[in-house]
Image: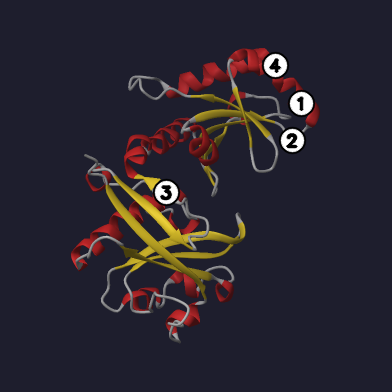
Amino acid sequence: MNNTEEINILWEGPFSKDEILEKEIDSTKYDVKSNSIGLYQIYGSHPLYGDGVLVYIGRTKDKNGFKSRLKNRWVIEHGNDSENIKIYLGTIFCDTCKLEEKDITKKIEKSEVLLINAMKPAFNSSNIQSVKDELIENRFIVYNRGNYRSLYPILDSGYFWKEHKNYGLVDKLAKELDIKIEHYNFDYGLELNDKFGFKSDYKIWFGVDYAIWDEKKIPLCLEVYSDDEKNMKKLKKLNSFNIHTYEDDGERTLYYKYIDIQNKDLDFNQTIKSLIEEIKGKM
């Protein structure tokens, strides 16, 4: 018997901040209300990531709902291009059962933790890595329905719980090497060229690439790539080194190698360094 908890979230929007804070949401078009409780996504401009990107995920369990929670929020009132932000509201539902308020609030809390750590919105950076094992170790699956925008349609906490410590390994290596982590909507890692003297016409990167994680189920990898077509042909030599390829959304081929994280005594600094030296030897 499968006892995995399922959490369904209906996302509606986009809404402007005025629709939620100053007016009433159109009840003929939407089920959600300004005083509903649930989760919210905020999309806006970011100086590094561009316009219309996911910048924040939050929740409200307040009896006055979204209107109360979103009032005077910094990311809404003082963020970049705050007048043009788009807000999506998510409410918990169950088609086959009646949910008590205490059940709904617990599902909201658990869903927020998983969504933030899976999506890593730019302005949630202080909350990333704040996962409490006891909160998500009992497996549950979040199903995002409706207009969920950039979110994954399905998120499995069991899978995430096993793998989220990969971020910690990236943080550990960054600290040891004194390299700043690059955090975007599509990856979390660090560029290693300068530290290891890799050729400047190639880029070598280590971390969690969300696209490869999602499609290949490989959460932690070492990537080698170049923006020069001639260099990309040279990278084909790496196939004999048992390195896989992946076509990203920009039609760029990434060459990556899976990093085994099962050995708890593994010296990641030395392992990455050894891999880089082997790759350099193949070039």
Whether 40 is drawn above or below 273: the answer is below
Q: Which residue appears at 36% of the width and 36% of the height?
A: 165
Tell whether 259 sits left or right of 161.
right
Mark whose residue sits in front, 1 or 3: 3
Q: Residue at x 32, y 64 (%)?
A: 93
Residue 231 numbered mark, or none: 1
* Residue, disc 4: 237
Tell me the amino acid under the disc marked 4: Lys
Cβ–Cβ under 8 Å for marks 3 and 4: no
Would you say 142 lies left or right of 213 here?
Answer: left
Residue at 67% in and 13% down: 282
* Tag 4 secondary structure: helix
User: Crowding at label 4, few (<14), some or many (≥20) Cα neighbours within 10 Å?
Assistant: some
Check disc 3 and report its element: helix, strand or loop.
Answer: strand
User: Which circle's residue, 2 or 3, is located before the other in the chain?
Assistant: 3
The answer to which quarter of the image holds residue 193 is: top right
In the displayed image of the protein, which residue is found farthest to the right? 230
Query: In whole angstroms, how far apart are the C-alphas of marks 2 and 3?
Result: 33 Å
Which x, y percent locates residue 43? Answer: 53, 64
Nearest to viewer (mark 4 / mark 2): 4
Q: Quadrant of residue 4?
A: top left
